[in-house]
Amino acid sequence: MKKLLLSISLLAMSFSSLAVDITESELQGYMKALPAVVDWSKNQDSLKSMDLGNMLGGSEGGTNATALGALGMIKDNDLYKEFTALTTKYGFTPEQLIAVGSEVSMAYLENIKGNLSPENKETVNQLMGGLQSMSGSQNNSANSMLGSVANSANAASAAAPVVSENNVNLVKEYMPQLQKLFAMVQ
């Protein structure tokens, strides 16, 4: 069950603190981009020490702090231009892909909550709170990351994170495909 809850793309790499409606086109683009991004990351020697695939697709070992640092690590290794070229093929900047992924992840979690026990629903709410708390500018450095991590801990205790109803309904239509996608990028 824990693995299912964490099998969410771009789970903790959110810079957005408010729910934003995504379009079906953005969702489809995200679903196409995710496997390419994971494949790209596996071919980068400087990213070998970091399992970007598990960070982007979720894993038991991935944490909010490490996932948030993934884009920074890409920048630190002078791979940002190459990563931008890849995400642009799918109609996104890296930051837009992260934001859409966050919204998809939160809506995905909201959709799976219905069949869970009260304890597991609380775990999902904590994960979603962590997603929402990762606010701030993409240009901020370590101070922003530390603040986001602290906010994440505070937000984890929040009861019901804000998730766009539009996103929940849109993602609901794509749940079978998303489940396969998240399992594939594990």
Image (tube, rainbow, N blue to C red):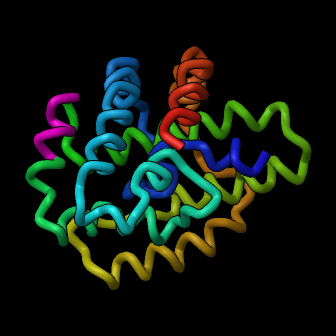
- Magenta highlight on residue 43: no
Range drawn in magenta = 84-90
Image side of residue 87 versus residue 13, left or right: left
Front-most of 20 and 130? 130
Q: Examine the rendered structure and indicate whether residue 34 appears above or below residue 72.
A: above
Residue 118 vs residue 38: left or right?
Answer: right
Marks counted in the figure total: 0
Q: Give the image quarter of residue 157.
A: bottom right
| Residue 105 % position (x, y) | 53, 41
Q: Classify 20 as above or below 72.
A: above
Residue shown at 60% from the left, 43% from the top: 7
Q: Main secondary structure of the magenta part?
A: helix
Residue nearer the viewer, 163 or 76: 76
Q: Tell me if residue 76 comes above or below residue 89 in the rendering.
A: below
Q: Residue at (17%, 68%) from the top-left corner?
A: 77
Seen at 22% across and 36% down, the residue is: 92
Q: Among all residues in the image, which is located at the extreme top? A: 173
Nearest to the observer: residue 89 or residue 23? 89
What is the x, y in percent for residue 122? 80, 54
